[in-house]
Image: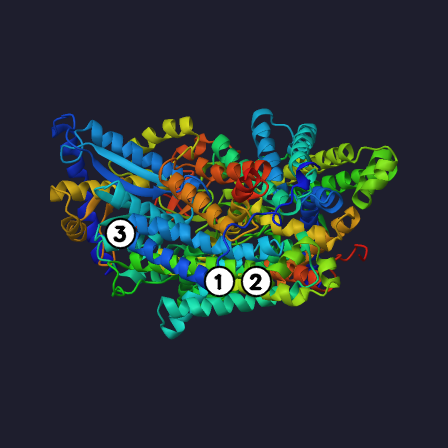
Amino acid sequence: MQSLSRRDLGRAALAATAAATVPATARAQAAPSGPPIRIGYSMSLSGGLAGNGRPALLAHRIWAEEVNSKGGLLGRPVELVNYDDQSTGAQVPGIYTKLIDVDKVDLVISGYATAIIAPAMPIVMQRNMAFVSLFGTGVNNDFKYDRYFSINPTGSQVKETFAKGFMDIAMAMDPKPRSIALVNLDSDFHQRTAESARFLARQHGLRVVYDRAYPPSTVDFAPIIRAVQAARPDIVFVGSYPPDTAGLLRAASELRVNFQMMGGPMIGPHITAQKLQLGPILNNLVVWDVYAPEPTLQFPGTQALIERYQPLAAKEGTDALGHYVPPLAYAQMQVLEQAVRRVGRIDQAALAADMHANGFDTVIGPLRFDALGEWTEERNLYTQYQGVQGNGIDQFRKAGTQVILYPQRYKSGDLRKPYTAGA
Amino acid sequence: MSDATIPATPALPRPWRIGHGAFWLGSAAVALLLIAALRAFGSEYAYFAATFVLQYVVLATAWNILGGYAGYVNFGAAAFFAAGAYTTVAIGKALGLSLLPCIAFAAVVGGALGLGTGILTLRLRGAYFAIATLCLSVVLQTIVVNWSYVGGSRGAYVIRPRDVPWPFDSYSGFLCAVMVVLAAASIAVARSIEKSRLGLGLAALRDDEAAAEAAGVPTLRLKLVATTISGAMMAVAGAPLPLLGSYVEPNSAFGLAYAVNAIAMPLIGGTGSWAGPLIGAVLLASLQQAATVTISSAANLMIVGVVLVVFVCAAPHGIIGLFRRRA
Amino acid sequence: MDPDLALLLNGIVSGLLLGGLYAAAAAGLSVSFGMLDVVNIAHPAFMVLGALLVALLWAATGLDPLLLSVLLTPAFWALGAAIYVVYHHFFERRGDEAIQGLAFFFGVMFIIEVGLVLAIGPEQHFADAAYASTTWRLGEIDLPLRMLVPALVSFAAIGALVLFLRRTFTGRAIAAVAQDREALRLLAIDPVRIKRLAFGISIATAALAGGALVVVQPVDAWSGHVFIGRIFAVVIMGGLSSLGGCVLAALAFGVVENVTATFYGPSWSPAVAFGCLLLVLAVRPQGFFGRAA
């Protein structure tokens, strides 16, 4: 199964490069005309999710400008209609009914993260609209909506695959690790990631010596790290979000941890400000990610997007590097765009059928959806920060600072151990 | 000190002398009219916006029974609201019941929670009571987060049933009608309390608890009755929430917005009578809903803050107070 | 040392350091809520305002965050005094400060938070102190300076405040205003002026607490929310107007949280801490260190 899908992917990658070179030059640059195609969604521009919502919106705007400057979609200009959901799920149903009923948008997509996607589902399902979501985990497991498509590299087999990269890297170490500690934030995403790590640890015969969740209101992380240290694990798998990641890593640095390997889905250094603050503490941390500026992970348009994004972000004061959400948000729009172009009209049923039937070439690589709308092949990256010195931003722009360890096909460096939190 | 000499509530002229029964009939009639009007309008967005506003009407009216009539500030409105929402999740999952019986269960759970709060905080007044309810909210949220049966921190999905109850054209329409009925009922309950011996007793509690006690008002019992009724009604307000969004998770169900709005709406409308929370909720909730889809930036949260500050400064007895003073 | 004992000791010590942060945050509230009877629920929001200003100034100047927060205190004092003037004019004078005043500060909290988002965005901001990555060790006990320095600064500030309240005439007048307003009038002291001064002080301590907070962790506009419940809990357990009680309660709160997190897992530590407060309220509403009513 694994080898087969990998072969598929290779073929798709070939097609991607072929497809990308042709239309850019061949298409006439006619100005779009007619009524705009309106794409509606809610986005978190204030509240806890705004730190990722704003960069996502910026990527969407870049996409819209590019499409409009190249003749629009089906010859019509595209227009983004979006409202701030304040990071509150309770606002979302109202926003989508307004978008569909009052604004009469032609297409809908989702805002950022599960808590915002899930409340939109019943509204979208009622109108039978195709729905491309961003960073949702397992949203469709309960709804089983056949027009739902997820832009999230974790795929549908989260339990079996999410932590696989981490475990594979760990089990390839010499000597082999024998025990593991699991720490996770008590949240939807991190419960799933910890479940995956727990499941795979058992399969590899690792002894779980510490396994606890912490609440979002935690202020001091020293007790957690200390309890982990006391349990003497060989490797540590952590699932956390930005404020806590900084707290955990600083506590790790203060307590002079020394683990053969530490990391996991520690969302935090994904955000530029935190990369800069943590600096050398990141060295040898193995982090789950969706993108890293490595030569092995370049697809048509990726570099161009990042280069477009960074000056705009500097102007608007959002995330400076844009390595985390923007490529995926841009890909979200690309999926919609390619499906509309292939179908040739706005027809929700035909769009959904096309999305199920065909693959897409995006700035984050070729992808394809399964029956539940998740990626047929997951693409969890495990990366390691290496040789970070000081707190400058430029080292994070170039290759070699965040090397990719997994999966094999994108690998750009070798594991360094142990993790000592910058010491 | 000049303003303080104008008494807030006792001096109000009472032009309407309507009996309890008549008021209940009146609210039922208004509810029916409202349902019919919304049905005729027939827009899904109208249903949603109305449900959103009415949910706050119930919540604000419920808060006002304890906060306005008895003078006990409950910071934990979100806890009761979420208790209602999670009752729907738990009962729906355990017994497979539909929304209406879940609302009844929510009332029981909220009432029990209110009674418990009342017993635990019997000796507390003023800010102490407020802080205690805030703590209750934190403890309850921690319990829900650690209770995996209702989804824990992952949240729970509640899928709307496929068949829509007669005579509604969509499930949103049905939810909206349920909310209209709940709002009308809660206003009628509030008005009945206000005009009854219970209401008089609560007002005595608010004005001077020690004096009321000395005068033979059964303060403890009144307080427990008020916390129970208020808690039950707040939970009822939250019960339809899981079906409204099909997904609840603790952070949004226990959101600060509910606690703030539950306090802000009665204050803006006027805490002395049943009409205050109604006016405040309709005004503030519509403003918020409109701002979400027009201004649509962080600035629309600013509205709540500014409106609240301006009103408590300029109109200490709410909108009702403004009209009374002029009259 | 026995590993469990080392864990326990470290849990207690780190709890004490965390308690230092809580004490810094709660001290101002102890003045405003405890002594002046002003239920300033926006206190954590002022703290976050201070923290974010410190972060911005730090990015511009590179000075030490705690030093910057000290420099901010006069501005915060003025802000506090101004807010008290408004509060007094609209609420205290009219005599309905209870609910309306509470709602007023709720509104102020919203305005501060949203204003911060509009002005500097929803992202997290941080400020690095030069000592933030150093840790002292006493045997098996760790003392990270990131926690220790803010705690010491906050204890020093609270100590100075206690001295001021005990030793100076104005300070005693502040303590007196909490107990008997009319008596002050008889001494020809204007209670409003005294309260304005005291409320200014309480907001000034919020700036200091903000400096401490931004050294400890990155801060965004909503970082204050997790502190609302905690600092009210601390002030009540400490017996309202007693600053010493407030510090002890803050330390106890930190220790309970961290020892629970070390031994029973962090997911229950908020419930344990707030459960304690509920018990205190139910059994001894005047707090551990308060006078019986």
Nearer the camera: disc 3 or disc 1? 1
Determine whether, in the image, residue A417 is placed left or right of residue C158: left
Chain letter belonging to callout 1: B
Q: CA distance from mark 2 to mark 3?
A: 47 Å
Residue B164: horizontal and vertical position, in percent? 26, 64
Mark 1: amino acid: His
Nearer the camera: disc 2 or disc 3? 2
Chain letter belonging to callout 3: A
Disc number at residue B74?
none
Which residue was labeled with disc 3?
A: A124
Disc number at residue B20?
1
Q: Are marks 3 and 1 on the same chain?
A: no
**Residue closer to the observer: A403 or C160:** C160
Residue name at image x 18 percent, y 48 percent: A359
Q: Secondary structure at mark 2?
A: loop
Residue name at image x 41 percent, y 36 percent: B297
Q: Quadrant of residue B134?
A: bottom right
Which residue was labeled with disc 2?
A: B196
**Residue closer to the observer: A374 or A90:** A90
